[in-house]
Structure formats: C-alpha cells, structure tokens
Image: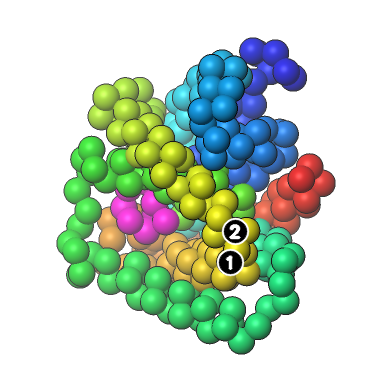
Amino acid sequence: MGSFLGRLVKGMIIALGFILPGVSGGVLAAILGIYERLINFLAHIRDNFMQNLLYFLPVGIGGIIGIALFSFPVEFLLKHFQVPVLWGFAGAIVGTIPSLLSESTQKSKRDTVDIIWFIGTFVISGLLLYFLDDIVGTLPVNFITFMLAGILIALGVLVPGLSPSNLLLILGIYSPMLRGFKSLDLLGTFFPIAVGGVIAMVAFSKAMDYALQNYHSRVYHFIIGIVLSSTLLILIPNTGSSEAISYAGAGFLAWGMALLLFGLGIWLGLWMSQLEDKYK
C-alpha cells in the first residue's frame, strides 16, 4: 500500500483515531507502518522536506475524507443511544490500559515516584475536569476551542495509546466538532483544528521525543492517570457539562446493551493494543 491510493486509505483509517474515544491515531499509524516515519519527519522537518510532504499529503487528504465519512454515524449513535455508546467507548479505553501499563515499564521498573505521579495526576486531573465548568465556565465553541481540539488530536498521534476524544467529551467540544465535520465546515471546524494540530505537531514532536527518551516511565504514568480519570468521568453524570452522560429514561435494555458494549469495548481495546505490539 505504498501508492497514493494506499496512503489515502491509511489516512482514512487513521481518522478513526481522531473521532472515536478509545481509539488512538498513533496506534493506528503504528499498525499501518507510518508512525516512525511521521515522528522522524516532524522531529527533523527540514530533512527531505518535499519528499516527506509528498508522501504524507495523501495521508492528510485521506484523514479529511475519513473524518467527513465517519463523523455522521458517530454523532447519530451518540444522539440516539448515548448510554450504551459511551459505555462502549469507555470499555475500549479501559482495554488499552494494560498496554499502557506494560509500555510504562519498558525502560525502567515502576518505582514509588511513578505511583505517586500517577495518583496525583489521576486525582488532580479528575477534579479539574469534573469541576471545569465551575472553574472556567462553559467553554465556548469557537476558533480557539477547536484549535485546542486540534492540539489534543495531535497529541493522540504523537503518543500511541492516548485517545484524545474522551478529553474532548469532558471539555464539551466533541459533539460540536462532530457536527462541524459532518457539515464539512471547512473554515469554522476543519481549519482551526488543522492549525492546532500542526502547531502541536511542530511544537511538541521534539519535546515528546525527548521526554519519552529521558522520562519514559513518568510520561506514561502521567498519561495513564489522565486516561483513567477522563474515562471515569465519561460515565458519571455532571450537570455542569453539556456533553455529560444522562441516565434519565435508561431502562433494562439500555443497561444490558451498555454492559455488553462495555465488554466488547474492552476486547476491542485489548485487540488494538496487541496489533500495536505486533506492528511496532
């Protein structure tokens, strides 16, 4: 799949990591064999710039096409089947935790500082995200917040295993983003997200590479803390968040579907993690 069309399809697949909670764009890029080249390109952007630009151009085009195609069914499911779908998303995120835990000790053994770092991140990020509306008020849907979405999405590519969509859900940006994707709002949604993504890629690629090389265990325990706290908050009702789950009217069937999809989500997360390990 080294052709233009093949890379276009890869971009469409990676787009799933941008819009599905529990799915990491970085993991998909690793599975499809372009992650290392992408990180190398971003970390050394002046080296073979035109050659790399032409290589990744169809990937970017495919990503835009994939976002436009996949955002409609995701928004529809969230609107009409919120409880089962969010439990399924949460399960998929939980399924990636064993892989993140394993990755966190690849370069050094887990120590007391790692555990304290994880607990501190989990508690502080959880409290900040839960009371975000009380602290800063409702985030407006505008150019700046969509740039923030782009930054988070880019971090999901730079750090395999990190799914930004659960953070977007908590921040109240996720549904407006999907609506913008579905309506092909190029200037209002695609452009600011692209700007934020490019800024994050250029600004953080070398920093992330340095941090992972020198503070690998600390970085991953920080990520695990945020992932767990934000995933837990997906399932907790919060009157201060317009995106928060609501269990009003959820009957036996909805709960049965929620538990089933939670289990399937865990399986999907584990399977994705195994694929990532296979194609590293």
Residue type of the residue flagged with mark 2: Leu
Classify residue 198 by image quadrant: top left
Residue lying farthest bottom?
Answer: 112
Q: Is residue 144 magenta-colored?
A: no
Q: Residue at x 65, y 45 (%)?
A: 27
Q: Residue at x 72, y 53 (%)?
A: 273
Residue carrying label 2? 212
C-alpha gap between disc 1 and disc 2: 5 Å
Q: Residue at x 44, y 39 (%)?
A: 202
**Start-end of magenta stretch:** 167-174
Residue 60 location (% of width, % of height): 51, 24
In the image, is residue 45 above or below residue 200? Answer: above
Q: Is residue 168 magenta-colored?
A: yes
- The answer to whether residue 19 of the structure is visible from this angle is no
Residue 136 location (% of width, % of height): 19, 64
Q: 10 Å neighbourhood of mark 1: few (<14), some, or many (≥20)?
A: some
In the image, is residue 18 above or below residue 47? Answer: below
Q: Nearer the viewer, residue 224 or 220?
A: 220
Residue 253 location (% of width, % of height): 56, 58
Q: Nearer the viewer, residue 34 or 161?
A: 34
Classify residue 194 by image quadrant: top left
Examine the residues drawn in magenta and state their main secondary structure: helix
Residue type of the residue flagged with mark 1: Tyr
Residue carrying label 1? 215
Q: Left or right: where does residue 46 sit relative to residue 257? A: left
Residue lying farthest front?
Answer: 47
**Residue 57: image tag:** none
Q: Residue at x 27, y 24 (%)?
A: 187
Q: Left or right: where does residue 142 sit relative to residue 56? A: left
Circle 1 SS class: loop
Q: Quadrant of the N terminus?
A: top right
Contact (Cβ within 8 Å) of mark 1 with mark 2 = yes
